[in-house]
Amino acid sequence: MAIATINPATGETLKTYEPLTDDAVDERIGRAVEAFRAYRLTSPQERAGWLRAAADVLDGDTDAVAELMVTEMGKTLAAAKAEVGKCAKGLRYYAEHGPAMLEPRPADAGAVGAEDAYVVHQPIGVVLAVMPWNFPLWQAMRFAAPALMAGNVGLLKHASNVPQTALYIEELFRKAGFPADVFQTLLVGSKTVERVLRDDRVAAATLTGSAPAGQSVASIAGDVLKKTVLELGGSDPFIVMPSADLDRAAEVAVTARCQNNGQSCIAAKRFFAHRDVAEEFTRLFAEKLSALVVGDPMAEDTQVGPLATESGREDVEKYVADAIAKGATVVTGGERVDGPGWFYRPTLLTGVTPEMDLYDEEVFGPVAALWTVDSLEEAIEIANSHPYGLGSNLWSEDEQERATFIRDVQAGMAFVNGMVTSYPELPFGGVKQSGYGRELTELGMYEFTNAKTVWIGPRSSQQAEGTTASASE
């Protein structure tokens, strides 16, 4: 895939880049290593100051960066501005809480026969981040903020269709005053990832992307015994029970499925309505989906923009066509929008069966599949049969149903009466083929630190006597 900005609303190629040569990549890794030698010795308070400065720079660049993201991957302008604000919040979160997270954690010294015992979290070095295009600023920032706070340095291999956003992220940290080469963007293709990850100077990697990409990175990292954190696909269940506020549930269901033009790992993709409310929920869901304004992502009233790539729309079309051919019913949507750009109408399908490709696959576009179920247990059983386990949603006012859902759903996150999203204050990640490890909170920062045990033995009696004598003199 070429490294280029291609406007998905028009299909026009706006800017192209030559990938870095192998020699240039080697030189940048070397610069990262040199930067780490000094940066690891900076104080958490210094790093917090630079993170705050980066948040301030982002605030000032909001309009320009938002328009850049819209141009590169097609999210609506409102969504892009919200993403910039979320990134600034994440930077300030680690600036405020990071120093305390890095304080030594005392242990029970007496229990281990020590005068003192504690744990310190120390940086591990150069970390490679392989990031996707769908949230081109936030995905990178939720790695960068905790990694830089911990004293690591970063190398960013971003998706090839958001090169200008990738370059801006490097510029952002430079403008904020971080030492040179602490964070660098590598404009390279996916084939270069293995070479970088196998380099002895690179300590670890984090990837957000597809399951096949995660398998590849995990395999390489395992071969060279390097730590990885993987945030992969999702096909989140959204369960609606009779006690739910159906209008509110349908309203959130539309946002949960069509956020970011339907291109989100944590978007709700499989919907389960209890038989007692299925007809009404389906009607409300379909009405609200069909009312969405699809169009120019720069326009203020647009709610759904284009898919990010032409191949992405083709994939969505194939999934829907396969489902229809095998008996699924289109309640609304089910077709592309005529004209330039890679637009697809928000779609609701019913009658989905295991024979259909979208039953087990993640559809990365504004397409929802809805099942009618007779119980919460049936919904959870179908939900758990899927290979992914990232987020999950339940709409219910029944306390026992909530407890059952939280206990039994196989997911890294369980949201009740609300939409799955990410917060700096909560861990983010999944189970099964949705990956492993956690981002955000202190857990996300500790993923790339050495939790070093420190044990200090009791002073000898001679040392203790010497200290006493000195004090008496």
Image: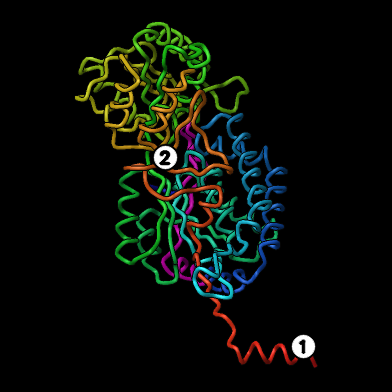
Marks 2/1: CA–CA distance? 57 Å
Look at the picture and state if 250 lies above or below 88: above
Image quarter of the C terminus:
bottom right
> Which of marks 1 and 2 precedes in the sequence?
2
Query: Is label 2 or label 1 in front?
Result: 1
Which residue corresponds to mark 2? 412
Answer left or right for 277 relative to 44: left
Residue 389, quarter of picture? top left
Residue depicted at 34% across the width and 27% down the height? 316
Mark drawn on residue 471: 1
Evaluate whether residue 10 shows in this view. Answer: no
Q: Amino acid at mark 2?
A: Gly
> Local crowd at mark 2 within 10 Å, few (<14), some, or many (≥20)?
many
Q: Secondary structure at mark 1?
A: helix
- Color theme of the render: rainbow
| Magenta segment includes 5 | yes
Let me know if residue 304 appears in the view.
yes
Q: Residue at x 72, y 57 (%)?
A: 49
Which amino acid lies under the numbered mark 1 shown in the image of this protein?
Ala
Looking at the image, residue 249 sits to the left or right of residue 335; the answer is right
Dot 2 falls on a residue whose secondary structure is loop
In the rendered structure, which segment of residues is drawn in magenta?
4-30
